[in-house]
Amino acid sequence: MELKKDIALFGPSGSDDDFAKEGHTATIEMPKWIRDRGLDLFEYSFGRGVRISKDTAEAIAVEADKNGVEISVHAPYFINFASVEQEKADNSIRYLTESLQALKWFGGRRCVFHPGSEGKQPRNEAFARTKYMVERAVEVIRSPELDDLIVCPETMGKLAQIGTVDEVVELCKIAPNVYPCVDFGHVNCVMGGALKTADDFQRIIDKFFDGLGEEKTKNMHVHFSKIMYTAKGEVKHLTFEDTVYGPEFEPLAEVIVKNNLTPHVLSESAGTQAKDSKYMQTKYMELLGLR
Ligand SMILES: [Zn+2]
């Protein structure tokens, strides 16, 4: 598979409603469906657990390769590296390892995970625990088979979750194969809707440039969708039809082009992931053409 490395890439996370409406049922049909729309990426979510056989994953990998679509995976949502229960924290390492094994079968390189939740602990303790456990996880996954894979801690949308921009920067300093997953919808939720202008997005990007340098910032993983929020943060994912909560993609597109970023951008819209990633790709390409 030849991947375009010098431009931003786009695609859906999970199955768009149109995929089923057009009569498709199996993930193996997804890579061609994505390629037919001119998109580049697909994120396979193991939200409720890593349940895929080697045969199925490898068959999907053949289709992905044939159609030039790169697959990333999302590790289970119940990963919690901040847990005070050691068994839960240890299991989190296992969920990550299982996700990476499946990622390897898919022929992909990137695995996104949610770092954890503070629970009843003070924030600094919860973060220290998370960092210690992610360090251990990185040790465990350092094996000849999984060595070329990248793990991406995600910026989270609820205030009680570990994963502010600063925390994700810190986690990404742990090892060369830890890259940021910046979910700008989530960042907008915890900042109460503060991501509006290109300068607002630039300030976030600058934190990654300052903390992690060029390589990890330019090639960051991005989740982008509009998300409803309250004072506690994220409530639910919306589509690009939303005009109330945001954020808008256009200012981020400006920042991506201006800084020569080449992120992998996944849409997590509610049912319109393919349509909305196509929208983002189109806006980005327009700006790139104008440059
Ligand atoms: Zn996520």
Image: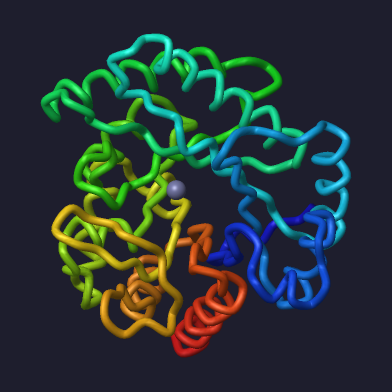
Q: Considering the image in quadrants, where does the C terminus appear? A: bottom left
Q: With respect to residue 55, does 227 lie above or below?
A: below
- Report the residue at 22% width, 69% height from top: 195
Q: Could you tell whether 48 is left or right of 236 in the image?
A: right
- Report the residue at 28% width, 15% height from top: 84
- Report the residue at 55% width, 25% height from top: 95
- Report the residue at 78% width, 70% height from top: 33
Q: Could you tell whether 53 is left or right of 289 in the image?
A: right
x, y percent for residue 125 = 16, 21
- Quadrant in the picture for residue 212: top left
x, y percent for residue 179 = 43, 40
x, y percent for residue 277 = 55, 73
x, y percent for residue 83 = 32, 20
Q: Say which of 206 and 140 sits in front.
A: 140
Q: Say which of 203 and 54 sits in front.
A: 54
Q: With respect to residue 113, does 249 lie above or below?
A: below
Q: Could you tell whether 22 is left or right of 100 in the image?
A: right
